[in-house]
Image (cartoon, rainbow, N blue to C red):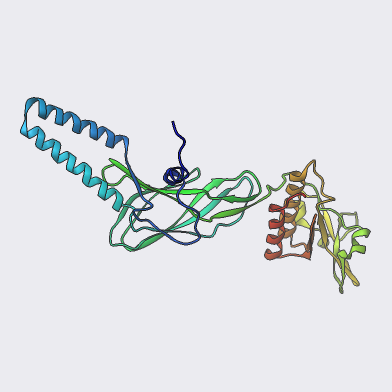
């Protein structure tokens, strides 16, 4: 058997993978829609063959009439199967980052700009499947979820929209690819390791900044510390009992440093850093962040938090 040419291989791949990924909305037309008989359709063909055989053997005009009538329905169904998808417009939406182990959601917008109802549309993406119907001149958004296992970018892959409407004799489908991906953060550690304590060396590196009666830092609880200075949020999370320290001349923040983070490997360290980031942000603590090749000055807030998590997700060793 001779090997397939490059053009033939490309044509065959379009049946399952679609054309090249796009950032623009995609309109379904005759180039993108494929149609093949379903199992029910193949059974229908066998029935037609039997009817024609009976009509031929017995020379029965009524059998011929029934066979031709069913055959006309069979071929007309091809047109209706095509029209069930033709003219639909699909575009990708924004996908929110998630932590490894959570389900990533890929948002897809579908517009029906025609004056025809679209019934029993099935959308497949990775392991997710949704079935929807669209009325005339309407649009909808669906979110297809996929399992995540490791940090970094996860691409959506090929999205397939299909329909067996109206009689289930044919399956019309269109494989589409969008430049759609979601950022996966490291999975947060489950262990309740306390925050790293500030040290004199960190102070010399600029971990401290001047202020008046400002937050100075955290230290392990010592008998006699004021109750109002206890960090109850960290205690509730099982991270230990910490006491907020104040000073009239200087203030401090905790530093989350990859080098000083416990762990047996890269992923364990990133996982623990991720846990500390989450807990520090929820506790309202100002924190600095340091990994090889990147150092982020102490701050807090959503922008700072996402910037640190993104650095963890995309961290690569040299």
Front residue (pair 250, 135)? 135
Q: Is residue 166 left or right of residue 160?
A: left
> In the visual, does 138 lie left or right of 314?
left
Tell me the residue at 79%/47% (across/down): 193
State the image coordinates of residue 293 (x, y, percent, origin top left).
79, 57
Task: Choose between 241 and 52: the one closer to the eye.
Answer: 52
Image quarter hosting the N terminus: top left
Measured as percent of width and height from the top left, residue 273 is found at: 76, 51
Write down the quadrant of residue 232 in the picture.
bottom right
**Left or right for 218, reference 236:** right
* In the image, residue 4 above or below residue 258: above
Residue found 74% across the figure and 49% down from its top = 270
Where 128 sits versus 222, above or below? above
Q: Please report the residue visible at 29 percent of the width from the left and 53 percent of the height from the top.
A: 83
**Residue furthest to the bottom:** 212
Q: Quadrant of residue 72?
A: top left
Number of numbered callouts drawn? 0
Tell which of 182 and 204 is nearer to you. Answer: 182
Residue lying furthest top: 57
Residue 279: percent from the left, percent from the top? 73, 55
> Residue 197: x and y, percent?
86, 55
Residue at x-position 6% and y-position 28%: 59
């Amino acid at each position: 058997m001779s090997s397939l040419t490059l053009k033939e291989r490309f044509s065959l791949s379009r049946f399952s993978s679609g054309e090249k990924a796009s950032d623009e909305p995609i309109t379904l037309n005759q180039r993108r829609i494929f149609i093949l008989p379903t199992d029910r359709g193949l059974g229908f063909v066998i029935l037609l063959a039997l009817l024609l055989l009976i009509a031929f053997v017995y020379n029965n005009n009524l059998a011929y009439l029934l066979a031709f009538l069913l055959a006309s329905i069979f071929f007309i169904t091809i047109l209706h199967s095509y029209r069930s998808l033709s003219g639909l417009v699909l575009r990708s939406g924004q996908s929110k980052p998630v932590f490894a182990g959570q389900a990533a959601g890929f948002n897809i917008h579908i517009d029906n700009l025609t004056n025809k109802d679209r019934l029993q549309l099935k959308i497949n993406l990775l392991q997710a499947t949704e079935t929807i119907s669209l009325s005339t001149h309407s649009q909808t958004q669906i979110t297809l979820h996929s399992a995540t296992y490791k940090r970094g970018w996860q691409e959506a892959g090929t999205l397939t929209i299909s329909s067996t409407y109206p009689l289930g004799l044919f399956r019309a489908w269109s494989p589409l690819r969008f430049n759609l991906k979601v950022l996966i953060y490291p999975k947060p550690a489950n262990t309740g390791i306390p925050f790293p304590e500030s040290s004199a060396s960190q102070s010399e590196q600029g971990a401290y900044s001047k202020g008046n009666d400002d937050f100075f830092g955290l230290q392990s609880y010592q008998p006699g510390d004021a109750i109002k200075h206890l960090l109850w949020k960290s205690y509730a999370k099982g991270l230990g009992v910490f006491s907020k320290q104040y000073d009239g001349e200087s203030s401090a923040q905790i530093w989350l440093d990859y080098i000083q983070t416990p762990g047996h490997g890269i992923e364990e360290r990133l996982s623990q850093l991720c846990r500390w980031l989450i807990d520090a942000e929820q506790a309202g603590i100002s924190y600095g962040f340091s990994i090889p090749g990147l150092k982020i000055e102490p701050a807090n807030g959503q922008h700072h938090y996402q910037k640190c998590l993104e650095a963890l997700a995309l961290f690569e060793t040299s």
